[in-house]
Amino acid sequence: MILTAYLDESGTHDSSPFVIMGSIVGNAEQWMNYDKRWGRLLGKNGLTYFHSRRLRASSGEFENWSDHSKLVLIGEIDKLQNTNSLFRFVTVVRKDEFQEHYKSGDRPKKLQLDSIYGLCFRLSLSFTAELLERSFGLTGRKINFVVESGHPNAGACPVIFDQIKKHVSELRDVLGTCTIEDKKKLAGLQGADAVSYAGYQQEKGGDESELMDFAPDWNLEKAKSILKAGSPVFRSYARPDILKELKDNLFVLEKRWQQFGQRNRAKLDEVSERSW
């Protein structure tokens, strides 16, 4: 089974206390149906494409839209996604906790720390893989990731993707591709934008009633049953201990690389001595 995850962020502007990356995941058949219905939904509302920033600012095609009309559109999008995707989720990283538990203090000498955007992507990829493993197993699965091209740090996503694919052996055959695409051209990216927008509004208002925190013993079927949803919306919060663990892992990886290099240099020295 080939799955595709579309991802888009919200909250990287200076005034926001947190960053959210919204994701929507589905299989090929679901995305085929999704694209058709998304086009009809846009046409019905006189839109060429969906952009939450313009919706929020009542600009562009959303000029003169009432708050009620906006809520109705978000409700229609949620209904469409609930019947035409596998699951949705938002990754939440608080900026103050990111700074305290990840960015500040000692840093690896060779490996670069992620930006808050890059960290959101790393966590989103991990969440996607973990939920799929719990729910279906990873054998015979292939996951492709598509991120929106508008953010200046989007280029880090394929780098992080390749790093995980190279060093996490369990995911080597599971991870397919990671591409950067134009939101205007892909219904999936516009859908991820809508997930990100809704999650941001709920996080901002302190209302997480429609988001499912990911418990250790849950899988997709259990979440569907609890939430009474075809495509549950999860909340993946980067707790301080998770941020610290991610940073510690970089030190471990760097040490392994150093040991690997020392062993190889020792072998080269041995060969050189024999040759001499």
Image (spheres, rainbow, N blue to C red):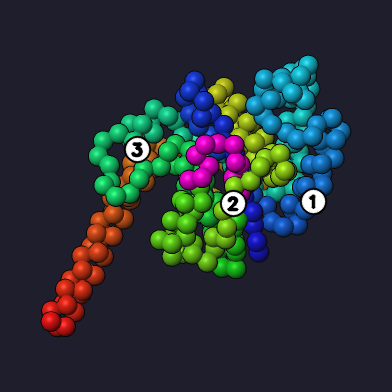
Identify the residue at image location x=34%, y=36%.
103
- Does label 3 or label 2 sit earlier along the sequence? 3
Q: Can residue 148 be seen in this view?
A: yes
- Give the CA distance from mark 1 to mark 2: 22 Å
* Label 2 secondary element: strand
- Does label 3 or label 1 sit earlier along the sequence? 1
Mark 3 and mark 1 in contact? Answer it, CB < 8 Å.
Answer: no
Identify the residue at image location x=25%, y=56%.
255
Quarter of the image where one finds residue 234: top right
| Residue ID for mark 1 | 33
Identify the residue at image location x=46%, y=42%.
118
Name the mark nearer the viewer: 3 or 2.
Answer: 2
Identify the residue at image location x=77%, y=47%.
34
- Give the CA distance from mark 3 to mark 1: 41 Å
249 to the left or right of 200: left
Mark count: 3
Identify residue type, mark 1: Asn
Q: The N terminus is located in which quarter?
A: bottom right
Q: Nearer the viewer, residue 125 or 268?
A: 268
